[in-house]
Amino acid sequence: MSNHHEAAPDVTAGLDPEIADIIEALDSGFPAVHTMTGEQARAAIRSRFVPVAQPEAVGAMDDTTVPGPAGVVPVRIYRPRTAEGPVPTLVFAHGGGWVFCDLDSHDELCRDLANRIPAVVISVHYRRASEEGAWPAAAEDVYAATCWAADHVSTLGGDPGAIMVGGDSAGGNLAAVTAVMARDRGGAELAGQLLLYPVIAADFDTDSYRRFGEGFYNPRRALQWYWDQYVPDISDREHPYASPLQADLAGLPPAITFVAGHDPLRDEGLAYAEALRAAGVSSVTRVFDGGVHGFMTMRALDICRRARAQACVDVATVLGHKVTG
């Protein structure tokens, strides 16, 4: 009888060196949101937020509201610092498990995207689960903001033929769903979608969930809790406006999907990109093997800067515009 035992695979292999240096602190410092109410989680996350001391200058920034399905929807509009002629418009939905984060948490990212693409970026502060509104409130708010952007694109300095939706994590879910809604409803005519490590399906048994569900900053228990807050009725999670992987994807706008290699959401992002291709949709996939969930908001990291630069090039390519960043 052999006493040989096969060593367990090292799930940290290939982790970006800069992330490897901080992953333990990142993971241990993440609040136990699954034990909290939505309001408590928002307060806990907000208390960790450290604004950028000197925000990157943009051409203009305006906080305003747009009409929504249940009142007004707050948005923050960024215009690029330098641009010639009409530019693309990116309607952006912030991440945060549909529960927390806001216009401020993603301000630095939106400024960077506005200047680098360059584009008018409209950051949407949708209703957050569950106290402000459960599914499909957030998706309907982002869709409403996208329709408003399409109706006002020329006034904003945008190119009517270059309107995109985008978002990170839960915001990537909302962007993907908005693209499906726009197709279904004959709403805003979209030229693309930018999905940064998006939440695509309520499937917690993928290989990436098993490998990276603990110890990589955004644990399985938190991700399950986000779904419990946003889509509490499990039967609703199969709806295409909750899980876009369940949608008929034909006729959707070109997609750019960024995936982190050490992220529980890796496999669903890859599956969605492949499903789009199978449906005849132009689909670009960028896999940053060394990344963890949220790495594109970690601006001090080289992997973040490289991914953002690639995203801006990809957006400009899809839209037929010239990137400046």
Image: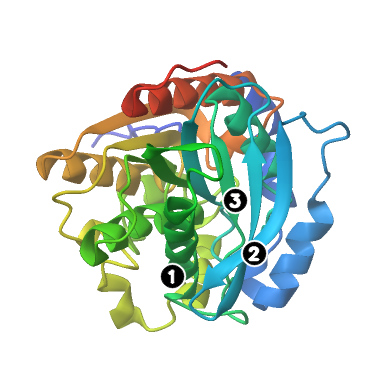
Residue 14 in view here: no
* Secondary structure of residue under mark 2: strand
Residue 151 occupies which quadrant of the picture?
bottom left
Q: Is residue 52 left or right of residue 231?
A: right
Q: CA distance from mark 1 to mark 3?
A: 15 Å
Is 111 situated left or right of 13 in this image?
A: right
Cα separation, mark 3 vs mark 2, equals 11 Å
Q: Residue 273: x and y, percent? A: 26, 40
Callout in the foreground (1, 2): 2
Q: Secondary structure at mark 3?
A: strand
Residue type for callout 3: Ser
Q: What residue is pinned by disc 3? A: 123
Question: Quarter of the image holding residue 64?
Answer: bottom right
Q: Which residue is mark 1?
A: 140
Residue type at tag 2 = Thr
Contact? badges 1 and 2 (CB < 8 Å): no
Kindly identify the amino acid type of the residue bearing the numbered disc 1.
Glu
Q: Nearer the viewer, mark 3 or mark 2?
A: 2
User: In screen coordinates, is 223 left or right of 101?
Assistant: left
**Image mark for residue 95:** none
Q: N-terminal of the two: label 3 or label 2?
A: 2
> CB of mark 3 within 8 Å of CB of mark 2?
no
Which residue was labeled with disc 2?
A: 65
Q: Mark 1 vs mark 2: which is more N-terminal?
A: 2
Identify which residue is drawn at 54% across, 45% down.
155
Pointer 1 or 3: first along the chain: 3
Choose between 42 and 15: the one closer to the eye: 42
Q: Work out which residue is located at the far front of the displayed protein and give it.
A: 155
Q: Position of residue 294 (x, y in %)?
A: 57, 42
